[in-house]
Amino acid sequence: MIWACGKTVITLTAINDLKYNRFLIHKVLVIAPKKVAEDTWTREQEKWEHLQKLRVIAVLGSLSKRVKALNTPADIYVINRENVEWLVDYYKNDWPFDMVIIDELSSFKNANSKRFKAMKRIRPLIKRIVGLTGTPAPNGYIDLWSQIYLLDQGERLEPYITHYRQKYFEPDKRNRDVVFTYKAKDKSVEVIKNKISDICISLSAKDYLDMPKLIVDTKYVQLDSKAKYMYEVFEREMFLQIENEDEIDATSAAALTNKLLQFSNGAVYKQDSNEFVEVHKCKIEAFKELIESLQGQPALVFYSFKHDLDRLQKALKSMKLRVGVLKSSEDIAKWNNKELDILLAHPASAAYGLNLQDGGNHIIWFGLNWSLELYKQANARLYRQGQKESVFVHQLVTADSEDEDVLVALDDKDVNQNKLLESLKARIKKVKGASSLNEMSN
């Protein structure tokens, strides 16, 4: 497994050597996130002179297009991870790929997912396999089992995830029946590292290249008095509905924090509806001021919710800027060719593998989320090999709101479900305590 540092071109170079110099492989499959499959592998192959012999074809689109692509002569076939199960069923035991590359291997970290089970089924027929990721263990070493299993079929970290958990971890957060999180036993992390050290390589661009600076600029957004009062009421009413904060689980925690983060951004979805209500313009106004301060420099803007996108597009209309939304390889090309001033993107669709460093050096987070993996990967779209300018990460954070809890967790470099639960429980206690004092004074 290779972690970070120009992993696409490194892998293509290895494929080229194995195929045309050593004659050790015949047909290669690359499994990647959809947008990476659409753009990155073909674009990277075209950029390098020593890779011109390689024929790369994307296996995407409708069933007929995918079948046609698979029957077209090529060296490398690139498919999106959502179609892995289909591909395994399509070939069954007549598997033709003697080498498989999994780009963003961490997307196979869930041992219960269909994509992992499909790969596990076909794994004995694969002679060579490589996993690429910049974030191998975003939520701790518990995530490593399924990724390493696909590399060695359970040789190093036990053949079953239950055995892995029992050997190296112990329950952490739980209720009577369900274990929510696990924590590593003493010295387990070092043992795990040693066991996988012979098949894993970690490369960091800053260790080998003169990388520009990464500058994080956190801008706190103050709510006006009306919006601040509304937020406090909204938060209090939501939290007071919870009888026992110790019983809050991951599902209800996610729902609570989502609502509070929506409000922090300025709009909230109606109950069981795609319609939303705008509750304040404070963060939108701060965003417009930030855009103006950039003096025409392009910015990659990450949003959290669909209503964020709608409101951002509306706000940008009056600013006479060239605005795009990241949906396809055409949008990537426009950005990298500096044909856009603003590229709006959701971190989940832009976080993995996309090369956007040619289009600019300013990132704006209109709304942060709890995923450290998405945060780091999204920032790495500009702060990566080939970037010539210092990269500025501007974070718009609503003061005295759930935004601040997310920011603290991201700064701690330890964002996981546990952090989310702890944050919400602390806030619930605070709100209930304040409510009790108010009742006593009345």
Image (cartoon, rainbow, N blue to C red):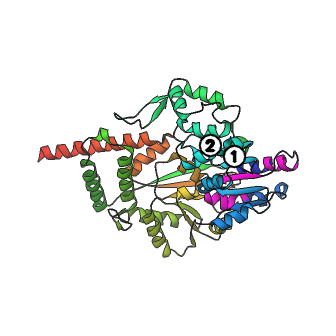
Mark 2: which secondary structure?
A: helix
Q: Nearer the viewer, residue 153 or 418?
A: 153
Q: Quadrant of the N terminus?
A: top right
Give, as a single range, the part of the protein colored magenta. Answer: 14-41
Where does the image place residue 51, in percent across and percent down from the top left? Answer: 82, 55
Task: Single out the mark in the foreground, 2 or 1.
Answer: 2
Residue marked by disc 2: 120
Where does the image place residue 59, in percent across and percent down from the top left? Answer: 68, 61
| Left or right: 364, with 440 as reference point | right
Q: Nearer the viewer, residue 135 or 125?
A: 125
Q: Quick check: 170 above or below 441?
A: above
Q: Residues within 10 Å of mark 2 (few under 14, many from 20)?
A: some
Task: Give the amino acid at mark 1.
Answer: Cys
**Residue 5: mark:** 1
Residue at image point 48% right, 40% down: 412
Q: Nearer the viewer, residue 408 or 131?
A: 131
Q: Residue extending furthest top?
A: 186
30 drawn magenta: yes
Q: Quick check: 100 above or below 354?
A: above
